[in-house]
Image: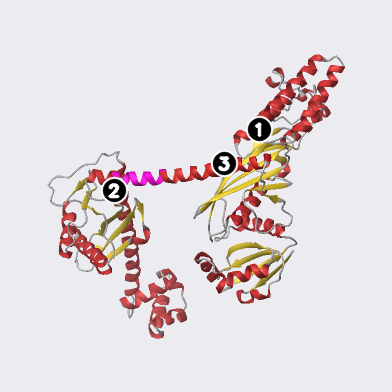
């Protein structure tokens, strides 16, 4: 492999050769990895104005500041390298498999009388790992079969030869019920144990035919030597293996070692089913969802999923069945779309799984949407509102002993916070701690602004407070001429009472109601937002007071310094030259002189 780096303007000098290209932004972050049969043609297509690239791709191209390429021998090698780079770096414009599970493996340990047991973390030095398995159930089925057919120990004892010879151990219950032959006390030789283990390995690899042949030969050998009980034992094991194979058989046993990958998609996502088939038996089946990032084609998405799933499940398939044709064959990847026979049936089975997964995802999304709709519909019913309150705004004031009075407005759309619509307000027309007048001011300012900009009004306005704050907000709406155009309520904290304008008595919503919990959440969010703003403001003013105490430094100068350096500590650490750039040489000298005079004070 050969790597090189280019600037976007130099893309025409790229080679006409298979490889991988990497795009970096201004912060030198990797934002996209792609593979190409011809690097020159593929990379150039991003910068060709006549290529008709979509808006998402144009957005990405605007961010590109540097290009890196790596040359490989074939397009298949490029696919593998692309997969490794995406898995390692997670670039923001690359599609990712929406699957954060850790999968189980079966570990064959490196020790005397090796054990087989399930694990999730792979530590290569501990032994040989088989898997990963797509589900715990699939793994347990294989493990149960192995333990049924072979006497593999399950204890954690260190069976070093000298410890067995010294008689350190005693046989356990597993020996007495016939699941172990007692290697811990020397009743089973390691050579005999390894014989069972070799057959277990074939089953772990999916080679059931080898194990079946072994049991048949042993059964016949024992029968010929008149060891009928032993022959019967091998016959029972052969039947267990055949029953297991019959349950997992999905195609003719002659179909060996292939992967099946099918895709269905919509505007936003693709749903892929992946299966591995060995000797006609389905050993792996996995569904994944891929979110489209740059309006990728089904072919791109299918190839991406195929390579990543083959890597994840470590398959060594000799051929791959797909449900869509590739525009061009990929050297090194043996794929085709079957039209008839058992292989066609495998595609139909895989596609059935992909379609079911898509339907399941849509149903889950619909249930989540129904839940959101249910809560705001319940709120509409509880408050007897004329429309579904899918746009709610809530106001709160904050001041401590009359200092730095501020207010906040939070917005919820479809029952969820719309953080970009949140607003902070400095109280401008009110002197002293007057919550009622402050509420009237901010409500008036908010809806005057919406009227001027022609933006839609909320379906419900919530005031954090009782009748007094609610009346002030109503006065503001009346002055604007919009009172009655949107419902407005007040929510009092003490008993969670809901007040409507003009009503003498509040209403109470069931304390366990989802609609009340939504109102409480909105009210608490408005309070949090106001308090945070108030604290920041007080902190800034405290810094400003320290600075304005210095002779010759006024409020405007203090504001400039705080705006530039963010804190008094950082101002005190700045040099005279850095300060002079902000407030001029004369005031900088004054500030430095004061700082030197009061050092250590």
**Left or right: 267 as drawn, with respect to 343:** left
Task: Mark 3 or mark 1: name the one nearer the start of the chain.
Answer: 1
Element marked by disc 3:
helix
Which of 193 and 155 lies nearest the eye of the viewer? 193
Does residue 359 appear anywhere in the picture?
Answer: yes
Q: Is residue 547 above or below residue 393?
A: below
Disc 2/disc 1 C-alpha distance (Å): 53 Å
Q: Give the magenta range.
A: 367-377
Q: For residue 152, which quarter of the picture?
A: top right
Which of 273 and 522 lies nearest the eye of the viewer? 273
Name the colour scheme. Answer: secondary structure
Q: CB under 8 Å between callouts 3 and 1?
A: no
Q: For residue 209, which quarter of the picture?
A: top right
Instruction: Examine the residues drawn in magenta and state their main secondary structure.
Output: helix
Disc 2/disc 3 C-alpha distance (Å): 42 Å
Q: Position of residue 134 (x, y in %)?
A: 61, 40
Q: CB under 8 Å between callouts 2 and 1?
A: no
The residue to which callout 2 is attached is 519
Which of 553 and 388 lies nearest the eye of the viewer? 388
Q: Position of residue 42 (x, y in %)?
A: 64, 67
Q: Nearer the viewer, mark 2 or mark 1?
A: 1
The residue to which callout 3 is attached is 353
The residue to which callout 1 is attached is 248
Q: Is residue 552 above or below residue 155?
A: below
């Amino acid at each position: 492999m050969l790597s090189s780096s280019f600037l976007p303007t130099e893309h025409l000098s790229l080679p006409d050769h298979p490889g991988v290209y990497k795009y970096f932004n201004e912060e030198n972050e990797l934002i996209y990895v792609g593979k190409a049969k011809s690097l020159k043609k593929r990379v150039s297509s991003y910068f060709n104005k006549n290529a008709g690239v979509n808006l998402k791709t144009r957005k990405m191209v605007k961010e590109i500041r540097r290009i890196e390429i790596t040359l490989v021998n074939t397009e298949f090698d490029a696919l593998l390298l692309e997969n490794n780079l995406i898995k390692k770096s997670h670039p923001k414009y690359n599609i990712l498999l929406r699957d954060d599970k850790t999968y189980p493996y079966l570990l064959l340990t490196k020790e005397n009388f090796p054990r087989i047991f399930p694990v999730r973390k792979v530590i290569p030095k501990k032994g040989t790992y088989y898997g990963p398995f797509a589900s715990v159930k699939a793994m347990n089925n294989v493990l149960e079969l192995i333990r049924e057919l072979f006497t593999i120990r399950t204890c954690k004892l260190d069976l070093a030869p000298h410890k067995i010879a010294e008689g350190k151990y005693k046989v356990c219950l597993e020996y007495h019920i016939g699941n172990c032959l007692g290697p811990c006390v020397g009743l089973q030789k390691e050579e005999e144990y390894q014989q069972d283990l070799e057959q277990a390995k074939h089953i772990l690899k999916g080679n059931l035919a080898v194990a079946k042949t072994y049991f048949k030969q042993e059964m016949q050998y024992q029968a010929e030597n008149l060891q009928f009980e032993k022959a019967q034992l091998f016959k029972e094991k052969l039947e267990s293996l055949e029953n297991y194979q019959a349950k997992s058989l999905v195609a003719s046993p002659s179909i060996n070692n292939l992967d099946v990958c099918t895709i269905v998609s919509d505007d936003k996502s693709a749903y892929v089913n992946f299966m591995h088939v060995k000797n006609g038996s389905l050993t792996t089946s996995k569904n994944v969802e891929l979110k489209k990032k740059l309006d990728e084609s089904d072919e791109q998405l299918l190839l991406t999923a195929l390579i990543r799933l083959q890597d994840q499940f470590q398959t060594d398939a000799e051929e791959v069945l797909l449900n869509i044709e590739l525009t061009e064959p990929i050297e090194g990847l043996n794929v085709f779309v079957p039209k008839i026979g058992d292989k066609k049936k495998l595609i139909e089975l895989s596609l059935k799984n992909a379609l079911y997964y898509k339907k399941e995802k849509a149903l889950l999304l619909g249930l989540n949407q129904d839940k959101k709709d249910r809560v705001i519909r319940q709120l509409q019913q509880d408050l007897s509102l004329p429309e579904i309150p899918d746009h709610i705004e809530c106001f709160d004031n904050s001041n401590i002993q009359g200092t730095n009075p501020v207010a906040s407005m939070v917005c919820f759309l479809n029952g969820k916070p719309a953080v970009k619509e949140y607003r902070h307000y400095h109280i401008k027309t009110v002197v002293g701690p007057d919550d009622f007048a402050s509420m009237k001011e901010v409500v008036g300012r908010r809806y005057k602004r919406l009227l001027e900009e022609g933006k839609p009004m909320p379906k419900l306005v919530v005031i954090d407070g009782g009748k007094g704050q609610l009346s002030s907000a109503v006065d503001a709406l009346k002055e604007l001429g919009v009172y009655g155009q949107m419902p407005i309520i007040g929510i009092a904290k003490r008993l969670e009472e809901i007040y409507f304008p003009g009503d003498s008595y509040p209403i109470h919503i069931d304390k366990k109601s989802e609609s009340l919990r939504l109102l409480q959440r909105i009210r608490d969010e408005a309070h949090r937002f106001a308090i945070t703003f108030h604290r920041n403001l007080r902190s800034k003013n405290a810094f400003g007071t320290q600075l304005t105490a210095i002779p010759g430094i006024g409020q405007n100068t203090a504001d400039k310094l705080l705006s530039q350096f963010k804190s008094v500590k950082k101002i005190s650490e700045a040099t005279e030259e850095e300060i002079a750039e902000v407030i001029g040489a004369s005031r900088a000298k004054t500030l430095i002189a004061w700082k030197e005079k009061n050092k250590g004070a």
